Amino acid sequence: MPCTTPAFELSGDDEEGTPIFEDEEGADDVGDAGATAPAAAPAPSSTSSDDDGGPLPTTSSSLPRQQAQAEASPTEDAREVTSEIVPSRQVQRDHPPHRMIGDIHQRVTRFSVNSLAFFSHSAYVATFEPRDVSHALSDPNWVNTMHEELENFERNHVWDLVEPPPNYRPIGTKWVFKNKQGEDGMVVRNKARLKEGIDYEETFAPVVRLEAIRILLAFAASKGFKLQQMDAKSAFLNGFIEEEVYVRQPPGFVSARFPDRVYKLRKALYGLKQAPRAWYARLKSFLLKSGFVMGLIDMTLFLLSRGGDILIVQIYVDDIIFGGSSHVLVSNFAEQMSREFEMSLMGEIQFFLGLQIKQGTFVHQAKYTRDILKKFEMGDSKPMTTPMSTNTRLMRMKMGRRWTRRNFEG
């Protein structure tokens, strides 16, 4: 049935004669309703007829509008259509603006996008180092870290809770909290160590010289193999001690049933004088039994030869870097270490002893430079080709006066 009345025309009672809907999609829906829905007609079906009598499909979204249009028409004249304002069909957001936190009009910068991973990671680790035990116990992240440390004690059978002996004075203990950072300065791990409270700074362990690390990197680059890195979890807890040592229960984790008991150590505890030495002896013994040969000068360097392939292992207390000409040797060594000790495999070496390392011959300390700039609040300073101000006026040096380096030092 043809329609001669415009779709947006109101009834004669409206003096303005302005359209109700401004969007074209809504206009089409109302046009269909005015042409096919008389006042007394029942609710329209899912199809309507065009000029040629063929069926036209009607969208499901237009059905309620057609029904409302038919019910609202007070006359049978199809030319006069009275319609109620139908709510606009705008797509609703999953999160309404009034429920959003923060300024929704603020622009998204590259810094905020790049820092998303940092804030996501910070939900699981604490970025501050507690001043004392009470401060740490107020943070759930540090409490979980302290529980992990005590679980390492139980797993490694470090101590036994016994009655205090009459002739021994138990040693006090203390918690030491430290954040472990990656090469980009992000906190990657919270570390809580329970140390002996007396003479805890008197420790000894063979350490590698920085020159030896550079030589190893150059040797690996010349041979064309990649260096891997691993870390021993709670390394000092793997060393056996021969002395009889008793320690008090750790602060914040005193047994409710036996508050007066003490722990008798089976293995070394962080802070004991013999702890680093016991760990090194345990690790050296394992490597020598596995067929490694220790260096004559550098006692932290171990070499394994199998046929025409070699495997090099460099130790720095609980940090170990290794690499070889055979992928099988490297994989077998990583598996053996994981079976003997609780190790954390870190993949290819990227950050070791303050050095940022790109596999090859490139070594730099950009992280230390950024830390120095941050310390002196110069992290946002603009780089300059010369440290001198452009407005500085230079004067010609007077002849006869003796100048030394101290005249130009700050």
Image: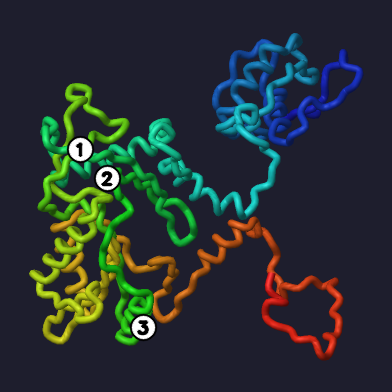
Task: Tell me whether circle 1 and circle 3 mark residues in contact (CB < 8 Å).
Answer: no
Q: In terms of secondary structure, where does tag 1 sit?
A: loop
In this view, the residue in front, 139 or 397, is 397
Which residue sits furthest right?
15
Is the residue marked by circle 1 packed among few (<14), some (14-19), or many (20+) residues within 10 Å? some
- In the picture shown, does residue 47 fall above or below 231? above
Give how far across and how far down residue 5 sits, in percent.
80, 26
Q: Residue at x 17, y 76 (%)?
A: 294
Q: Which residue is mark 1?
A: 170
Q: Name which of mark 3 and mark 2 comes first in the sequence.
A: 2
Q: Could you tell me the amino acid type at mark 1?
A: Pro
Q: Residue at x 12, y 30 (%)?
A: 163
Q: Which residue is mark 2?
A: 196
Left or right placement of residue 5 versus residue 226 in this view: right
Give how far across and how far down residue 17 sits, in percent.
88, 23
Q: Could you tell me the amino acid type at mark 2?
A: Glu
The mark lying in front, picked from 1 and 3, is 1
